[in-house]
Amino acid sequence: MMRAILLSFIISITLSACLNEPQLPPLTNDYSLNDRIPLSLLEEASISQENIHIAFAEVKEESRCPIAWQCLWEGEAEVELTVKKGDFIEKIRLKYDGGNCTECGNTAAAFGYKIKLEQLSPFPDETFYAQKPLDFNAYKIVITVINDNDKIYL
């Protein structure tokens, strides 16, 4: 009985906190759920209907094999996104496979949403890895954000 009361209390506090969530301002590049959202490195977009801001924060890894090379492994790239919902911030990492894949990007969860990495460009050419340090300023991604109704996040 005491557990049920405590659980009800926690759920009501959580729900009331969500209802009073501080609203983030819509950005110039404002999208909706299921839209394909293009982002350049350090660019931020909003999904104002969901009170979310998403930024392409950083390229964490780049090891995709240039097409002109013969590699034992096709490599992969990993990017980090910053997801804001009200006062809360979560960082997620998404990977993108090298080679000839059809579904190259993976998906990560944040705040009850699934974020899928649809595209990552440019693909490294044979001169890319000669740069010291590697220059990721031209990098762009395309993501899709969907509501993840299958899970409950408290």
Image (cartoon, grey):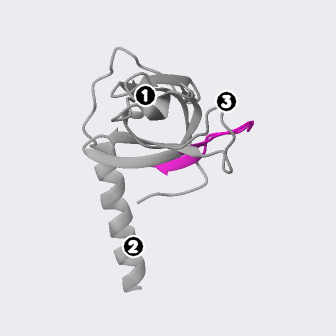
Name the front one of labels 2 and 3.
Answer: 3
The residue singled out by tag 3 in the image is 68
Q: Position of residue 8 (x, y in %)?
A: 39, 69
* Location of residue 143 in the rendering, given as x and y in whole percent from the top left corner: 54, 31
Instruction: Residue 133: give x, y in percent of width and height.
Output: 33, 35
Name the quadrant containing residue 126. top right
Residue marked by disc 1: 49
**Which quadrant of the rendered structure holds the C terminus?**
bottom left
Q: What stretch of residues is rendered in magenta?
A: 95-113
Amino acid tagged 2: Leu
Residue linked to disc 2: 7
Which secondary structure, mark 3? loop
- The quarter in which the N terminus is drawn is bottom left
Task: Please tell me the numbered disc located at residue 103.
Answer: none
Q: Is residue 22 magenta?
A: no
Asked if residue 74 lies left or right of residue 47, the reply is right
Inter-mark Cα distance, 1 to 3: 44 Å
Q: Which of disc 3 and disc 1 is earlier in sequence? A: 1
